[in-house]
Amino acid sequence: MHRGLKAEIRRIALLTLFLLLTGFLWGHILLTLLLGGGLYMLWTFAHITRLYDWLDQSAEGPPPEASGVWGDMTDFLYRMQQRNERAKQSRRQLAERVKDITSALADGIIILTPDRELEWWNPAAEKLLGLVKQDRGQSMTNLVRDPRFVVFIQSDALPPPLELNSPEDPTRTLLFTAATFGEGNIILVVQDITRLRNLEQMRQDFVANISHELRTPLTVLSGYIETLQDNADQLPKGWAKALLQMGQQTERLNALANDLVMLSQLESNRKPPSRAPIMLDQLLQQIAEDARMVAGDNYLIETDCATDTPFKGEYKELYSAFSNLVLNAIKHNPSGVRVQIRCFHTASDIVVEICDNGSGIDPKHLPRLTERFYRVDQSRATSTGGTGLGLAIVKHVLMRHGGSMKIDSTLGKGSCFRCQLPLLT
């Protein structure tokens, strides 16, 4: 039992005994009890009034003096008020610290209400989007009017990051990323990626230029090597082997230049691919026949296309993508491996699978397989004759057609490349 409650009970007991004794001596016990109880109630009401006055003043300053139960109550309220004050102070300090941190960020941060209205932003967002104080409470779509952004920010399930030109400076590129928190509020992060995009464009231009520039000297070299090989009987002994190796390396350089050109075209071409109807079963059958000419009797290449639904896409690009996968299965596996080319469709997609029962790939390499020039085994770079760009080309072709690729592989059991393409109506 609390000390204040004990004191209050003791006070009431003593008061009752005093009133009974006084009433007995006076000869009016009931009247004395009523009068004493009334005075006690008035005293209690005075405590309640002082407590209410203190609470009405937002509990500022020390609580009113009291004893017993009322002393315990005022002490408890005072301690609770102090804890609340410390918590408010802590929240204010945290808010100031968050404000200082976000002010130091180069990325813009914007807080939106569930109705997509501006609630708060940091200085970087103010600079990137030209925001002013009067914009608070405005709809975000009134400030960034690009239709792509309107669809992006109004979507219930916020889509992947969106790249747009800055509304303040069209020469700059901004990346918008959004996430929900709380009760439907949205945090919008705005990043200036102009430098990254400029560097990417420089890289693409360099790759495109160097690959085109390589073609002319390679054509000249190939011509002279073929001429020398045709007249090998007139050359000194030992030149035949040298010319053979020169021809092989020139072919590798030609393949690399061609792959670089194609990858550059895929990356730089902003136009969507043509949507001519393609019978994928016929396309894959042609790829299988071409692969058999390369593989000879060393590999078993099977096709199983359970769909005759035409797919609308770019024939040349799709041929390059699927043939890269089939040729990879041949180049990177020992003789005797079976390569299966399967094709089927679901309610919304066409699926093409190129699977083999060969050596397989260590799972640690799978996330990086589609990177340019990435090789699982560097020692095989010369023996296989690959350029290291095949899977990068596959990825970009699928992306241009709205598709994706999933790779499953187990060491010693083989690999399966699953390409998923959306059916277009």
Image (cartoon, rainbow, N blue to C red):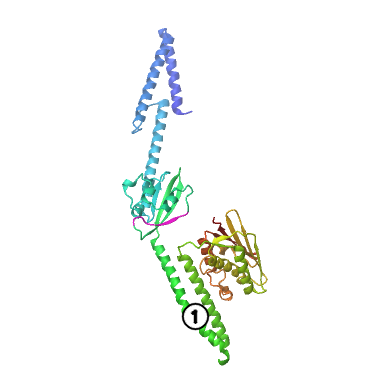
The residue sitting at 59% across, 58% down in the picture is 350
Residue 416 shows in this picture:
no
Quick check: 217 left or right of 413? left
Up/down of 389 relative to 224, above or below: above
Q: Looking at the image, how many numbered discs can be counted on the residues? A: 1
- Label 1 secondary element: helix
The residue sitting at 39% across, 13% down in the picture is 35
Instruction: Give the percent coordinates (x, y) of residue 215.
Output: 48, 77
Where does label 1 land, which residue? 219
Up/down of 292 relative to 8, above or below: below
Quick check: 154 left or right of 324? left
- Queried whether the magenta region covers residue 161, the answer comes back as yes
Magenta range is: 160-168
Instruction: Give the percent coordinates (x, y) of residue 277.
Output: 55, 61
Instruction: Give the percent coordinates (x, y) of residue 49.
Output: 36, 24
Residue 127 shows in this picture:
yes
- Queried whether the magenta region covers residue 424, the answer comes back as no
Three-letter amino acid code of the residue under disc 1? Thr
The residue sitting at 44% across, 68% down in the picture is 204
Up/down of 55 relative to 313, above or below: above
